[in-house]
Amino acid sequence: MKPVPALDFRRAAWEKISGPWDVLVIGGGITGAGIFKLAVETGLKALLVDCNDFAWGTSSRSGKLVHGGLRYLKQGQINVTRHSVKERERLLREAPGLVEPLEFLLPVYAGQGGLRAMYRIGLAAYDLLAGRKTRRSLSVEDLEALVPAVAGPGLQGGFAYQDASTDDARLVLRLIFEAVDGGGLALNHAPVTDLLFDRAGRVSGAVIRDRLTGDTAEVRAKAVFNATGAWADQLRGRLGRPPLIRPLRGSHLVFPRHRLPLNRAVSFLHPGDRRPLYALPWEGVTVAGTTDLDGGEELHTDPSIWPEEIDYLLSALRKVFPGPDLRKEDITAAFTGVRPVVGSGKKDPSRESRDMLILNEGGLLTVTGGKLTTFRLLAVQALAAAGDMPGLDRAALGNKRIYHGEDFSPPPGGANSWTRLAGRYGRRVSLLLEEAASGEMTDIPGSVYLWAELKHAARHEMAVHLDDLLLRRLRLGLVLPDGGSAHLDRIKAIVCPAMGWDDYRWGEECARYLAVWRKSYYPGGKGEGR
């Protein structure tokens, strides 16, 4: 099925939104996208809606890792690690170019003999759960050769092991677009304004509003999933349920690669509180994080990094990477995600369980917890908990592929770039190549993205605003200085014809995008903060 341009798709969608539907998924992050895709794979009629853009919340502001959670072993969360490692291995097989192997280095310093022993035991267990060995011991010389920036006083060698990284927003978007191509319906910028109930008083649907037009529709479904993550209690509150979620903020810093050059990830302990942190190469830049703090007061807007979080992360980075002498002025972007952790009252936020949770409360199925890595497993369990639906084979759910790739071979000499494009766009990659004009298969300066990707996203990926394009379809707002503002003229020449915008609309969208970027992605702690 050839994708429909965004404006035409939206108009057509509202003509058939009333359904009826087997499945209504509220929330377009990784959890909702996983449920939506798996429902379509099983032959169910499925609708997904989100009040903002797809992947707007936590799922575009994560640590960019598909990982087993090595630190959860130390906390005794064995099931979290077991499930995560197995799902990581599955995603590496199903989504090459989107989920990519990433080697992690664990430096050990003088006086950390106990840490060395803990790493050795933990990594052995990690490999055992994965069913393959990736760990190896490293001398001081090995570490300094692999990552020269990590050299410093007291370094005594360390270890290496393998996890994986991803573009988290594209992980979500590919699920949604493949589900749409398979017959599902998805709408962003379409909030739920009310829940609907059947004669028995159980949730049976929702009232959806189109933010662009103000139109509303009543949508009925056999199963209604609350997959709104950190915002789950807002829907649950309509049923009079007490709060369940403990929103935890995790913030990251972005540096240009030349200021912190890494070709592998480095995991290390903060010198103050000994929390595990990391720095990793990602999309042509270096990302470092993460904090783990209570702070859900920004749930109704784009969250911003706090100045003290910047100081916290920089103090650790300067200790582990003394050579670059990193400063606030080196930070090109920062981003903060809010994790949907089920609260248990633990004093230390980092010790809260990342276990998955599925609740059926009066017909509203709240699906939350877990990690980016375990979204498929959460989707399997969620659909299995949905009750009897004709055509749903619960026994077969766990064996369904979550991603489907393009079937034909890469062009000669372009295997690496082809794998990357195919990973991010799946079967739509052929359309991207077909529509690329002369000069559009070149990089947007300073980034790993092609101008052809921008045109494809504007034409076919249901973007409504410029920030949808530059912060989630492509990640230019994270990887380029000043959010890519130096390229706005060229961006305008591609985006306006594709989106049907005139000069006035373009001016509005630029103002909106730059306001969002300055508040929530601006480097150096100069945003609004607390």
Image (tube, helix red, strand yellow):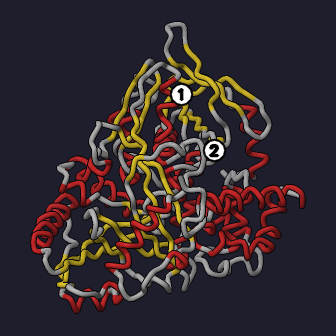
Under circle 2, the secondary element is loop
Under circle 1, the secondary element is strand
Residue shown at the point (72%, 38%) measured from the top left? 13
Left or right: residue 367 compared with residue 515: left
**Residue 52, numbered label:** 2
Q: Which residue is mark 1?
A: 22
Whichever of labels 1 and 2 marks the residue nearer the N terminus, that label is 1
Residue shown at the point (44%, 18%) measured from the top left? 362
Q: Which quadrant would residue 430 be assigned to in this image?
A: bottom right
Residue shown at the point (32%, 78%) measured from the top left? 319
- Note whether 15 is above or below 161 in the view shown: above
Three-letter residue code for mark 2: Asn
Residue 224 coordinates in the image, percent (x, y): 51, 27
**Residue 237, numbered label:** none
- Note whether 311 is above or below 145 in the view shown: above
Left or right: residue 41 compared with residue 4: left
In terms of depth relative to the viewer, which is nearer, 274 or 237?
Answer: 274
Residue 394 coordinates in the image, percent (x, y): 36, 33
Q: Residues within 10 Å of mark 1 (few under 14, many from 20)?
A: some
Q: Residues within 10 Å of mark 2 (few under 14, many from 20)?
A: some
Residue 162 coordinates in the image, percent (x, y): 29, 70
